Structures are given as structure tokens and as C-alpha cells.
Image: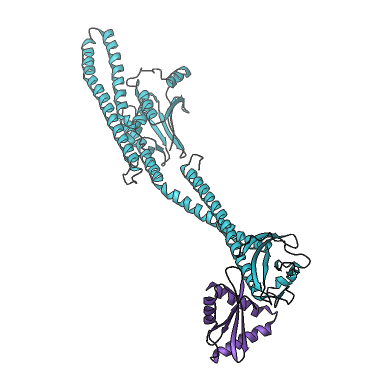
Amino acid sequence: MRGNSLRLRLGLAAAALIGLALLLAGFGLTIIFDRVLEARTADELDRAAKLLVGRVGLAPDGAPTLSREPPDPRFATPYGGLYWQIEAPDRKLLRSRSLWDKQLDLPDDRGGDAATVSDATGPDGGRLIALSRSIEIGGAGGTATRLRVAVAEDRRSLAASRATFLSLLVPSLAALFGALTLAMAVFVHRALAPFRALRADLAAIHAGTRERLPEAFPDEVRPLVSDLNRLLDAQERALVRARAGAADMAHGLKTPLAVLDAVRRGLSAAEPVLAEEIAEQTRAMNGQVERALARARLTERANLQKRVCAVSPVAERLIATMQRLPEGGSLSWDVAIPAGLTYPGDEGELMEVLGNLLDNARKWAHRRVRVTGTGDGSRGCLSVSDDGPGMSQTALAGLGRGVRWDESRPGTGFGLAIARDVAGAAGARMEFGVGPGGGLEVQVLWNAG
Amino acid sequence: MTHCRILLVALLCSGLAGVAPSRADDDADRARGALERGEIRPLEEVLRAARTAVPGDVVSVDLKRHDGRWLYKLRILDADGKRRTVKVEARTLKILDEDDDD
């Protein structure tokens, strides 16, 4: 997946948002847990404080006494983490055994009658959550004594609960993150499915197995598909028009050329030099007309659609034709084309290219024409060579540049040029060289796919 | 209702505490026996009657036999932080005595 991938970008954005949301949720849940834990602890402390309130009494001398200690064993363990203390004015402090050699230093009572929750320092220096109640009990002589009952718990036991909570919360949120991100990835993947289908359909159009995109797309994508289809239609119409125009012009020139040739024949007795000149010019013009017609036939090529055809059957048919032509039957045709080799154009185009090459070879060869094909799926090569006189290096270089070639034999002026035009339209290129038989070797090379 | 629950938890705690288990057990057994014999009313009704007389949190419950009658001695912490003692005749739910404290 590239950095530009929509799926990657959407997936990362979703993962980032999910992560952020879960992070906030984690903080929120921790805060809520802390609040609940604090409230619950205060509730438990208040319960213990009320138990003390119920049991505290006054000795005859007015000092507070406790009939029974509260039951939690932590009250009885020195520095046990849970403490109580009862203060009476000007009296000895009544403390839990857990306070041992210390006492609770509580902030001054704010005068409220209900329970007051505050922070305090424990006997071992730890932080405590303390709850105190200010009460009044009746003395022996009907006097009221004001007492302050306080219960405190070490916050370390709260911290342990918090750690347990976090040890459950963090993996849960991480698992939730994984599940949600996975779900989002699946979601994005499904949401982008129409684009994958579109890409496959476009590939089918490129490959030539389909002419138009199907309209069965979601509403969001359908306008794009419709526009593409309209573009394909418009392109096809423009091509048809251009092809028809070129063909019309070429056909229109054929009759005047025929007339001109007839005139030339009439002149040949009286003015042999002039007639020869006219003949040469009409031949050149005929060649241009043929070339224009051939180009018109292949304007289809410029379409988005690409066609492929198997090379071997076309070559066999063409060679069979060549063998029926003059000089063709006496030649030996060596053909070696693998069955799977395909040319990136339709059959007509391949016939145009290969036909011109074979025809050229037929005209120049002494005894033998070789047609070989090679291909490995990614590229292909079709080679036609003869054992004729060949061409000089200068002439070969000129051919490569598109310079006009030898016309000493009839009909050879334009065959190679047409073949090169048609091959070029299919994305293939032509190379000229000296073949194994010493004559001209023409190679058509293309990249498949 | 919360007060009632707090109280019951407190009672349960003292029962489990083991500071003075025999006495707490005796307490409860006495109450259970008296209720079965129909000599006293259930604690719930006693508490309701006591709280009607003195609103607040019941912080201590004691059942005593006195002059052939069962007496509930309740300590109630009222909203002002004052602890009051309320004695209730366990069979008739009559509030016998209500003072600041004993």
C-alpha cells in the first residue's frame, strides 16, 4: 500500500481517532473509579464511626470509654492502616491500638454536625482519608459532653484497588482498540469496494475484454462512471469521424490517380520520359493513399481499449497467401512462432504489419524467408529476415530515421512505412538490421501488458 | 431503610468480631427466642417506632429483661450530632423513656 492510499489514510485516521477516544475514555473511567472508590471508602469509614458513636460512653470522671472495640483486625494491628480516635475536651485521647505511638492530627472541626471527610497523615507517614463526626452525648449528671469521633484509612489500600482496576482497564481498552481498529479497517475496505470494482472494470476496458463500464455502482461513484462512459462514447465518435474523413479523402484521391495513370499510359509512347516521371509520381501518391487508408483503419488503436491477438495463426494464414503470390511459392518459409505469443493489437493490425514485412521479404529473398517469434509474457518479438541482398549500414540507419527507402522494385516504397505506422500505433517498435541469412532483418518488438 | 441496613451491618460486624462473641451471640439468641415465644415485636417495628419518636441514625441496639418486661435500649444519633437514648417496650412498642443519654 502506497503512502497515497486512501485506504491507508482513512485507516490511520480512524485508528488515531479511536485511540484518542479510548484514551479519553480511560482517563474518564479512572476519574470515575477514583470518585466511587473515595465515596465508598468514606461510606465504610462512616459506618465504623457510627459503630463507635453507638458504643462510646462516659466514665464517672467524664472521660470517654468504649465498651467494645470495633471488629476490624486492622484496628488492633499497630500501624495497621485503619485507625480510630475519640477526642473529648481536656481528656486523654481514646485511640485504636493501630495508632500505637502516634495520634491522628485532624484539621479543626468546621463545626458541621454531619461527617467531615479530610486528609490526614498516618502514623507511618502515609496519607490517610479521614472521616470525623462531632457528637454530643449525655453525661451521668445530665451534662452533655462534646466528642469528636474520627476514623481514618490509609490511602495505600485505595491505591491497591486503583492498580487492580487499571490492570484490568488498560488491557480491556487495548483489546477494544484492536477490535475497533480492525472493524474500521474492514469497514474502510468495504467502503472502497466500488473503486476496486471500477479499477477492475477499467483494466478490462484496457485489456479489451469490455467496451463500457457497468452502471451498477453506488450513487456516489455512478456520476464518475457515467462520465467515463460518455468520454468513451465521445472518443469513439471522434475516432469514427476522423477515420471516415481520412478514408474519404484517400478514396477520393484514388479515382484521379487512376485517371492520371491512364493518361500516363497514353503518353508512354509519345513521351516516354514524361510518362515515366508521371508514373513515379502516381506511384508515390498511391503509396501515400494506401498509407492514409491504413492509418484510418487503425485509428481505433488510440482508444482506451486494447486488443490482443495470437500471432501464430495470423502468420500461418499470411504465409499461405504469400506462397500463392509470384516468387512466393519457390521460397522456403521457415516459421518458428510459439503458440502462446500474442501481439498487442487486433488481428487486422497484425496482418497489416506482418503482411507488409512478409511481402517485402518475398520480393527480396533468394530462397529463404525466416519468421521467428519469441516472448516471455512481459515482452514479445517477431522477426522477419530474408537471404536477399540486404541493405547497407547507411541505408539501415536511414530506415531507422524514416528516410525514404528504395523503390527499385514495384510496391516496396510504402510497405515498411505502413508496417511501422501500424506497429507504432500498437506501441510496438521496429528495428532493422542484417539477418542470419545476410539479408534484411526486421524485428517488431513490444511490451506486453 | 439505609439506617436499618447500616445498623444490621453493624450488628453483623459485632457478631463476627470476636471481641466479645459470646455476649453478642447471647444477645441475638435471646432476641430470637423472645420473638418466637411472642414476647417481643420484630426489631423492624421497634426501629420504626423509635425513629418516629427520635429521627436519626440508630447506632446501637440493646435488648434487656427488666422487671419481667423486654426493653429495647436504642442509641440514636440525631441530625444535630446529639446522641440520644430511647427505651422501647419490646412487646407494646411504647416509648418508655427518651433522654439525651444515660
Is A331 placed above or below A97 here? above
Q: Extreme right residue here?
A: A101
Q: Is residue A403 visible?
A: yes
Residue at 44% in and 18% down: A398
Is A142 placed above or below A1 here? below
Q: Colour of chain A?
A: cyan
Percent of width and height locating residue A85: 71, 68
Q: Nearer the viewer, residue A151 or A283?
A: A151
Q: Nearer the viewer, residue A217 or A441?
A: A217
Q: Quadrant of residue B43?
A: bottom right
Q: Is residue A320 visible?
A: no
Is B8 placed above or below A103 here? below
Chain identifier for the purple-coloured part of the image:
B
Q: Quadrant of residue B25?
A: bottom right
**Quadrant (top left/top right/bottom left/bottom right) for the C terminus of chain A:** top left
Q: Quadrant of residue B56?
A: bottom right
Coloring applied to the structure = by chain
